[in-house]
């Protein structure tokens, strides 16, 4: 498995345009990026709690459920045998970026899906836990607009 990080960029063009406007004015974007990283974290936590949103994740196979029953981990939640993936999620932010991700080697296969196991015989369905909903985009846009308005009034 590749140790290279995967990168998922959101396509909120309206948000990106407003952030670009702030950057052109020489604004300190670090507080805004911290708020955006917070939205990423809240969204991801909710995705784990609801096992996918707005669409539910693909259910576990019966084989996986049976294996988890043997170790007293079923019934349980998808992607949360011991909570290692969910607890590995961390955010970072800087002057011009907000990031979220996991340092777990298996994180990408659960996000994107693919073949796993010996000889890549097991097909793991994508269960995107790093996924923003329309409501998340709206919350980010609201934070950007508030930041834009606050900083505009301070400079006036």
Image (tube, grey):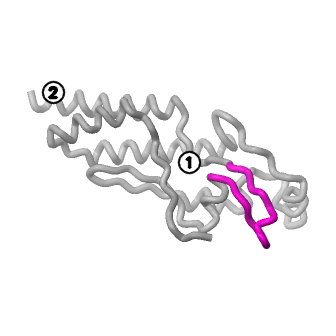
Asked if 84 appears above or below 127 in the picture, the reply is below
Relative to 101, is 76 on the left or the right? right
**Label 1 crowding class (10 Å Cα cut-off): few <14, some 14-19, many 20+?**
many
Say which of 69 and 9 sits in front: 9
Asked if 154 appears above or below 75 in the picture, the reply is above
How far across and down, in percent of the image, does residue 147 sit? 27, 34
Residue situated furthest left in the rendering: 156
Q: Does the magenta stretch include residue 96?
A: no
Mark 2 and mark 1 lie on one chain; the one further toward the N terminus is: 1
Q: Does the magenta stretch include residue 119?
A: yes
Residue wearing tag 1? 130
**Label 2 crowding class (10 Å Cα cut-off): few <14, some 14-19, many 20+?**
few
Relative to 74, is 151 on the left or the right? left
Residue wearing tag 2? 153
* Magenta residue span: 112-126
Report the quarter where the C terminus lies.
Answer: top left
User: Toward which corner of the image does residue 64 lie, by quadrant?
Assistant: bottom right
Q: Residue at x 57, y 47 (%)?
A: 45
Relative to 154, is 100 on the left or the right? right
Say which of 70 and 22 sits in front: 22
Kind of element beneath mark 2 = helix
Asked if 138 appears above or below 110 in the picture, the reply is above
Q: Which residue is drawn at 38% across and 50% down?
A: 98
User: Toward which corner of the image does residue 63 lie, by quadrant?
Assistant: bottom right
């Amino acid at each position: 498995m590749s140790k290279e990080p995967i990168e998922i960029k959101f396509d909120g063009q309206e948000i990106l345009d407003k952030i670009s406007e702030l950057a052109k004015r020489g604004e300190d974007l670090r507080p805004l990026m911290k708020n955006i990283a917070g939205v990423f974290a809240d969204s991801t936590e909710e995705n784990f709690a609801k096992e996918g949103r707005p669409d539910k994740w693909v259910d576990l196979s019966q084989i996986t459920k049976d294996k988890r029953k043997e170790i007293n981990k079923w019934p349980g939640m998808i992607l949360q045998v011991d909570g290692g993936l969910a607890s590995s999620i961390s955010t970072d932010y800087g002057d011009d970026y907000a990031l979220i991700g996991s340092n777990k080697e298996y994180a990408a296969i659960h996000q994107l899906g693919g073949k796993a196991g010996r000889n890549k015989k097991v097909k793991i369905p994508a269960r995107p836990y790093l996924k923003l909903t329309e409501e998340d985009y709206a919350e980010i846009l609201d934070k950007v607009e508030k930041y834009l308005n606050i900083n505009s009034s301070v400079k006036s």
